Amino acid sequence: IRPGLSKRADFSLIPSKSALLIIDVQDHLSSSSSFSTTGSVGGASSSSTTERSNDDHDRYLFTTALPKALPKIVQLVENFRHIRDGNHSQQQDKEKDGDFNCCCEVLFTYLESSTVDSRDVSLDYKLSGHLLSTNLPNTTQKATFDNLPPQLRPNTTRNKGDIIFPKTSCSVFCSTNIHYVLRNLNVEQIVVCGQLTDQCVLSAVRDGADLGYFMTVVDDACAASSFEDHERGLLGMKGFARVVKTDEIVQELQRSAGSSHDDLDAIGVVVDANKGKIASNTKVAPSNTNKLILKPPHSNNNSPAIEALLHVLQYANIKFLRFASVDISNSIRTKVIPVQNLLLQSKQQQQRRSAATANFQLSNKVAIAKACFGGMPYYADCILPETKLDARHVLTIQPDVSSLRILPYTASSAVVFGTLHESKMRKGSGVLGGHNNGDDDYDQISELCTRGLLQRVLETARDQLGIEFRVGAEIEFILVRRRKCHKKDGEKTGSSNDTPIEPVDYTIFASTATLNDQDNFINDVYDNLQKQNIDIETLHSESAPGQMEVVLPYQADVVKLADMVVLARETIGACAKKHGLHALFLPKVFEQYAGNGMHVHLSFASIDNPDSNVFSSSGGRSAGNSSQGLLSYMGESFLEGILSHLKGLTSLTMPTVNSYRRVGPGCWTGHSISWMVEDKECPLRVCLDVSSSEATN
């Protein structure tokens, strides 16, 4: 460890120094049939919490959180036991040499008082309702695990045996001798899972870190009373532990223990969604959806491929590479590096290092002031004091090479989009990253990164709900030209009538006149989008004078669609200028006519059945008469969630005063919190398939 330089992500598990700690997974707290008393599960609660009904929290915990977490905990327990019980040559060799210290210990801590009346529990628990005080398991009524999967029942006698720690407070380190036992076992690294994420898990992680243990929290093997509580708990542990997925822990154990993939992959679990039970010892296909959202993989950023790509760009007469990211006000922030300069940096790095160690990447090439992405209004380069941002800090753009596109409407430029990362500066030097060799030298994705936020939303949908989105977009714009004005005698230059704009036509919706008159422009837009691998599903004239709409087809890769929207708008604007026009995306251009919007089409499918449309009742369980039988329960819940937060969402979807000039009764924009089937006056419109009349999105 290098103080001040090393990061938790630099280290992985060492089986001989590791232990798995399962927190509060017991019938008393993890079985819905045993939960009949109000009060917070496994930790303190405020008086208001104990007085109100916990029905919503119970429902989420027992129908969503625990069914997802328990199979992951089973997977962890089985893998740790497998290594601990001497099934690997590494452990057997140690025992032959007389070293009988185990590795990969499995520890269970659960609530159980030492007195019949639970008078020995902490003051915190005594103030947290009957469930955590008078109704605790005790010396006469021991804690049970009968309603849990067999793998989650502590077994102290089989093989090397698990270790148990009955506790009477939120933190296992405060009310048991676990610290003493762990030191005797030479354990230095603790992997934590269980419930509740924001209470007992958080307390154990923070206390363990303060006592000198290297703590790791398994995100998808923890449960809380709500998704918000789970996220709040992870945020509270962020500075004390690594936060990883179950698959990552298994992979680390495989690498460190020297086991074959088949050996450990065979230990897995699946959940029967219909019965809610866990089937154990079932081989499951390795998941590729569990990605670290705070540090995405850079498989497309390896040195030989990057250098080859730069040579291809140069051969295609591309002289400049734009590094781009979209800020929270929808402005594209970009810096440009000549391709020749990037190739020169690669060559210099190879000269400084051997071919084996040279690792040229596009990371850490561009830094932009952090205030640009969240501290400034969209119309000016001035930092708003309310944002509490300043001019001292920068964010680095870490490019996603798969997003790279040659911009055919420019003379010789290409663009690549990337995520924004909090940069590291060498103290006192002002040099980005402490060195300038292009290595992966960044911390987490910035909270101001719109691309990172989208990735996290998609990750949450997969992990928490088991769904993946399919998204399409409609882009509206108005084509205008500058009207030639003849000044009257005595009229001053610069008056309001000096250079007004006028639409290219005054046609109506779906008119052929716009298509005919702007045929050259339309062809130019289409050709330029095709060269960027962007398809057009349909296009037509819209309601306002000079207004057109371009529809981008559905994409399963939502981040890719977001890139396409940005590229399409840039292309439309560039092509319009080429034809002496301006493409205006302003929400309201002409007061008496319709404005510009961008409609987003959303549907979703189960990750277990990507071809299904879970939004529709034909793809999921019917919701009955409440939505005319068109929507599944999940589809209705999806609509309800958007409607519940629609007021807050308008801060993002309608961020300017001009945005509100566009909406209102009769404007086909949606002006109230509502939804309907095929009604363009509602903000949420359920679309039907033309042939089957089924809800599609």
Image: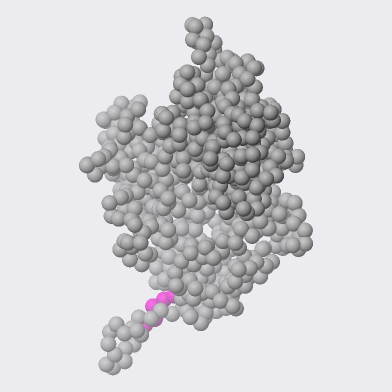
Q: Position of residue 597 (x, y in %)?
A: 52, 68
Q: Position of residue 196 (x, y in %)?
A: 57, 40
Quarter of the figure with the N terminus: top left
Say whether residue 141 is visible: yes
Name the foreground residue: 234 vs 327: 234
Picture layout, residue 667 above or below residue 534? below
Query: Is 481 included in the stretch rendered in magenta?
Result: yes
Quarter of the figure with the C terminus: bottom right
Query: Is 340 included in the stretch rendered in magenta?
Result: no
Name the foreground residue: 233 vs 683: 233
Task: State the residue at coordinates (32%, 29%).
Answer: 2
Name the foreground residue: 183 vs 642: 183
Total residue callouts = 0
Q: Position of residue 488 (x, y in %)?
A: 31, 92
Picture layout, residue 583 above or below residue 425? below
Q: Main secondary structure of the magenta part?
A: strand
Numbered range of the magenta stretch: 478-485
Task: State the residue at coordinates (53%, 40%).
Answer: 123
Say whether residue 261 is visible: no
